Image (spheres, grey):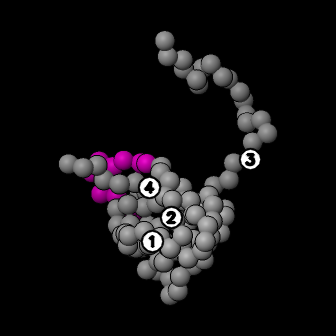
Amino acid sequence: MAVDLCKAIERPSDEFVKRTVVGSIDLDDEFIMNSQYLMRGHTIVIMPGGKTKFRSHRDKPSVTYVVSGSPTEHRSDQPSPLLRKLGDSSVAIDNVATWWENTSKETVMLFEVDFTELSK
């Protein structure tokens, strides 16, 4: 039998919890409203010397959070690469394309929440 956690744990507020918004996106300007989108959260692990593919965020906005390591973010809206560190976040919207690389000797882990169009 499934348990409805919202009913099972009734607390008026968090206890010993701090919530911090690391990035936000106004979705009104990002999507064609008659399309179907999927919101997903996923990790990206970049080994030393690794690089992600170049990715447009057209109709695919994202918020990326650095969980570990010191990655370099390359953005089409910045004149030079950005060295990120633990706890940094990055917001990419419609007019931005990005790729990440790890020039350090430590593994990098990113956590990203993005929106992507469902396959038809």
| Circle number at residue 66 | none
Q: List x then y, in percent, for residue 24.
A: 54, 58
Question: How far, Cα to Cα, is label 1 from label 3?
Answer: 33 Å
> Does 35 appear in magenta?
yes
Per the rendered image, the range of residues in magenta is 29-40
| Amino acid beneath label 2 | Ile
| Amino acid beneath label 3 | Lys
Query: Is residue 109 shown left or right of residue 26?
Result: right
Query: Is residue 55 shown left or right of residue 26?
Result: left
Q: What residue would you read off at disc 2?
A: 46
State which tag comes first along the sequence, 1 or 3: 3
| Circle number at residue 18 | 3
Question: How far, Cα to Cα, is label 2 from label 1?
Answer: 7 Å
Q: Residue at x 77, y 35 (%)?
A: 15
Q: List x then y, in percent, for residue 4.
A: 54, 20
Q: Residue at x 38, y 60 (%)?
A: 60
Q: Which of the two marks, 3 or 2, is nearer to us in this view?
A: 2
State which tag comes first along the sequence, 2 or 1: 2
Do the numbered discs 4 and 3 sit on residues whose CB atoms are within 8 Å? Answer: no
| Amino acid beneath label 1 | Lys
* Residue that protrudes farthest toward the top in the picture: 1
Q: What residue would you read off at disc 1?
A: 51
Question: How far, Cα to Cα, is label 4 from label 3?
Answer: 23 Å
Q: List x then y, in percent, for residue 11.
A: 71, 27
Few, some or many residues within 10 Å of mark 3 (<14, 14–19, 20+): few
Question: How far, Cα to Cα, is label 4 from label 2?
Answer: 18 Å
Do the numbered discs 2 and 1 sit on residues whose CB atoms are within 8 Å? Answer: yes
Q: List x then y, in percent, for residue 54.
A: 37, 72
> Does 27 appear in magenta?
no
Q: Is residue 51 above or below residue 25?
A: below
Question: How far, Cα to Cα, is label 3 from label 2?
Answer: 28 Å
